[in-house]
Image (spheres, grey):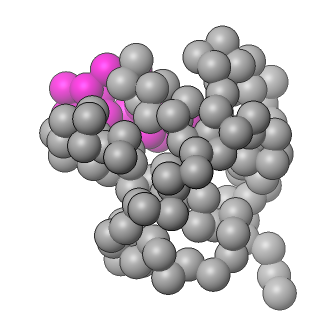
């Protein structure tokens, strides 16, 4: 099976795209950080350190301190793909985060995003 290109992409690049998407919809970096930290278990300082180190997406998720146990409750479609149908475990984690950021950008309340 071929590895997805996104796995080798620097997480900082993805994170920057998340920030831009959220900020275009009048959401704040603190909210993006809260979502990322909730899902992955990173602290805000740990997240900032990972972004600064320039690690790739695969390493970012592999080193996540505590992936949230309720992540499988995240359902829906993001980028035309149904999140719960993604077979590759790493790609599913990426899609979970995509879906949460998408909900944030759409103006959902933080309490509803963080199931």
In this view, 3 is above or below 61: below
80 relative to 27 in the view: left or right:
right
- Report if residue 19 is visible in the image: yes
Q: Residue at x 25, y 26 (%)?
A: 27
Q: Residue at x 74, y 26 (%)?
A: 50
Residue 7: horizontal and vertical position, in percent? 74, 59
Does 28 appear in magenta?
yes
* Among the 4 quarters of the image, the one containing residue 11: top right
Residue 67: horizontal and vertical position, in percent? 65, 45
Of the 4 image quadrants, the one containing the N terminus is bottom right
Is residue 77 or residue 24 the one in the foreground? 77
In this view, 69 is above or below 47: below
- Report if residue 52 is visible in the image: no
Q: Residue at x 73, y 47 (%)?
A: 61
**Magenta residues, start to end:** 13-29
Q: Residue at x 31, y 20 (%)?
A: 28
21 relative to 35 in the view: left or right:
left
Of helix, strand and loop, which mostly describes the magenta segment?
A: helix
* Among the 4 quarters of the image, the one containing residue 68: top right
Q: Residue furthest front?
A: 69
In this view, 60 is above or below 29: below
């Amino acid at each position: 099976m071929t590895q997805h290109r996104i796995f080798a992409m620097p997480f900082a690049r993805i994170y920057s795209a998340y920030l831009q998407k959220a900020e275009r919809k009048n959401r704040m970096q603190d909210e993006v950080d809260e979502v990322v930290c909730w899902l992955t278990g990173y602290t805000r300082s740990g997240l900032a350190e990972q972004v600064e180190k320039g690690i790739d997406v695969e390493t970012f998720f592999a080193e996540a301190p505590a992936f949230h146990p309720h992540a499988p409750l995240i359902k829906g479609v993001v980028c035309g793909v149904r999140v719960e149908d993604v077979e590759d475990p790493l790609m599913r984690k990426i899609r979970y985060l995509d879906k949460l950021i998408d909900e944030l950008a759409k103006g959902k309340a933080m309490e509803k995003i963080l199931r």
